[in-house]
Amino acid sequence: MADSNITKRALAAALKQLMETKPFAKISVSDICEACDMNRKSFYYHFKDKYALVNWIYYTECVAALKEKGYPTEWELLEDLCAYFYENRSFYRKTLQVDGQNSFSEYFRDIIETILSSDMEEIFGRDDALAFYVDFYTDAFLCAIKRWLLSRNCMPAAEFTGLLKHCLLRTSDTIVQKFSSEAEQKQ
């Protein structure tokens, strides 16, 4: 198992190094293998394709580390997630520009959806439209994170998460106040 991780890490380092000078779409499995002096057979033993390698990088560097921490609130999880993306923005800017089947964007969307599903079910219960609500918020978070990371002047992670938190809490408070006022007026 240790040898497997050494090989995977070598392939990951090679991909990251290549992405410093080449767009992700222009990097082939052969390029990755050549950069770390490995054969294609070794690559395919560990990964289905270069997209699976990107997803493995994200999982091992971010998701596994975040899972180990106990987060009292989702905000703290979001802060750490965004800090990771900000620190690695050069790499993720390039991977997030690729859309479609097997892309990192799809993989990341699936992770966000999994996280939000339990929260949305807690908020809405077993509502028939639960899937819609989960999709809406998943797409909103994915779009916001992509727009943030891909912007020319990407603001620091703490500033970005602060703005997200402020926006969501202020909107929620306003909606609650509005509905409370309307309910009082009807009585």
Image: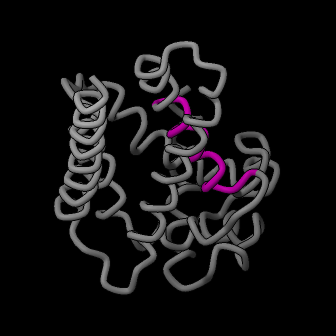
Please tell me which residue lies in front, 119 or 43: 119
Q: Can residue 112 be found in the magenta stretch?
A: yes
Magenta range is 102-115
Q: Residue at x 34, y 34 (%)?
A: 65
Is residue 29 found left or right of 133 in the rendered image?
right
Q: Residue furthest top?
A: 126
Q: Position of residue 162 (x, y in %)?
A: 18, 56
101 is higher (above) or lower (below) than 22: above
Q: Quadrant of the C terminus?
A: top left
Is residue 177 found left or right of 31 in the rendered image?
left
Please tell me which residue lies in front, 72 or 168: 168
117 is higher (above) or lower (below) than 111: above
Q: Is residue 8 visible in the rendered structure shown here?
A: no
Number of disc labels = 0
Q: Residue at x 57, y 75 (%)?
A: 18
Magenta span: predominant SS is: helix
Please tell me which residue lies in front, 116 or 77: 116
Q: Position of residue 105 (x, y in %)?
A: 61, 56
Q: Position of residue 152 (x, y in %)?
A: 38, 86
